Image (cartoon, helix red, strand yellow):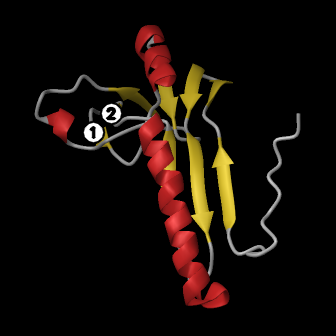
Amino acid sequence: MDDTVAPRSDIGHSAVVQFLGSRRRQDGEGEVFEAGRLAVRWIEQEVGPERHQFLTEETRLAWKALRAATRPANVQDAQGRRTSGMRIGPAAHDLVTNSGMLLSRGGVQRLHLATASPADQRVCTVFGVTSDQGSST
């Protein structure tokens, strides 16, 4: 089955969308769960105000779907410092919680899910897909 999405002819090629799924990966220290990435980029001056508004709305919808499918998670580095800006889906959360697998954002730093206190549960810190969104100028 081909998962390629044909571009709409009425809008042309205005933006670059990158989605890299999360994955389990072996490295020198064992198995880690590596974060995916969703990024959307365009140059506002090249697309004009109408298309910029359209792309902004479409990007909001993509992020809304991502937020609906994932949840905030408390993540800490080895020194206990909290890291924010990530989300995690239910299956990935169960995998790393049940296995004790460490998390990675693609570099050498290893993270783990932290136990959240009730006060921390109101703060939106996360793991799963890192975020970059919006226009680039």
Q: Residue at x 50, y 56 (%)?
A: 61
- The image shows residue 88 at horizontal and vertical percentages of 44, 33
Q: Secondary structure at mark 1?
A: loop
Say left or right for 89 vs 30.
left
Q: Residue at x 64, y 38 (%)?
A: 21
Characterize the local packing of mark 1: few (<14), some (14-19) or many (20 or more) Cα atoms within 10 angstroms.
Answer: few
Name the kind of residue labelled 2 in the image. Gln
Mark closer to the chain start, 2 or 1:
2
Depicted 47 relative to depicted 86: above or below: below
- The image shows residue 41 at horizontal and vertical percentages of 61, 69
Quick one: 136 or 8, which is closer to the camera? 8
Depicted 89 relative to depicted 81: above or below: above
Say left or right for 81 vs 3.
left
Instruction: Name the residue tied to disc 1.
Output: 81
Instruction: Name the residue tied to disc 2.
Output: 76
Name the kind of residue labelled 1 in the image. Arg
Callout 2–callout 1 Cβ contact below 8 Å: yes
Q: Quadrant of the C terminus?
A: bottom right
Q: Is residue 134 visible?
A: no
Residue farthest along the top direction in this orientation: 98
Q: Quadrant of residue 79?
A: top left
Quick one: 69 or 119, which is closer to the camera? 69
Depicted 109 relative to depicted 92: above or below: below
Characterize the local packing of mark 2: few (<14), some (14-19) or many (20 or more) Cα atoms within 10 angstroms.
Answer: many
